[in-house]
Amino acid sequence: MSLRDAIDNFYEPLVAEAIDETKGDGDSPDYLTDVMCVALNRLPAKYYRHSIDMMFYLADGELDTMKKQALTAVREAREFVKSHQRE
């Protein structure tokens, strides 16, 4: 296993979940990938090694806050990507 496989960013699944919640019928995989990249770049990195450790160390309410931040970042990223699409 490489070092890159040993860590994850806690925001990645939260952003993926927010994308699923806001998914439209006409959203292409390329568009959604761009949205995910832009949204993740707007959020702080929150790396962890073991997901159980991450959940244990989150303060009360922090997960809800992070989910709201992810949803906001996805909504903003959707607008950004739409307005910067190549013709």
Image: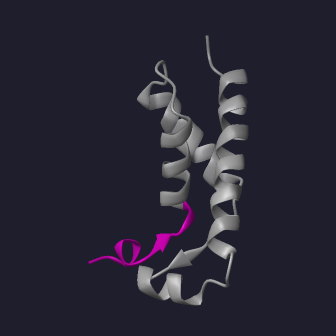
- The residue drawn where x is 42% and y is 30% is 29
Q: State the extent of the magenta-drawn residues as a range.
A: 1-11
Whether residue 80 appears in magenta in the rendering, the answer is no
Q: How many marks?
A: 0
Q: Quadrant of the C terminus?
A: top right
- The residue drawn where x is 65% and y is 33% is 78
Residue 86, quarter of picture? top right
Question: Is residue 19 shown above or below 83?
Answer: below
Where's residue 52, x and y in %? 43, 85
Where's residue 42, x and y in %? 71, 53
Can I make out residue 1 in this image? yes
Where's residue 59, x and y in %? 67, 85
65 on left or right of 31: right
46 on left or right of 52: right
Image color mode: one colour
Where's residue 11, x and y in %? 57, 63
Whether residue 4 appears in magenta in the rendering, the answer is yes
Q: Quadrant of the N terminus?
A: bottom left
Extreme residue toward the top, this view: 87
Extreme residue toward the left, this view: 1
Q: Nearer the viewer, residue 56 or 60?
A: 60
Q: Nearer the viewer, residue 50 or 60?
A: 60
Can I make out residue 45 in this image? no
Question: Is residue 9 shown above or below 42?
Answer: below
Question: Is residue 9 shown above or below 19?
Answer: below
- The residue drawn where x is 46% and y is 30% is 30
- The residue drawn where x is 66% and y is 23% is 82
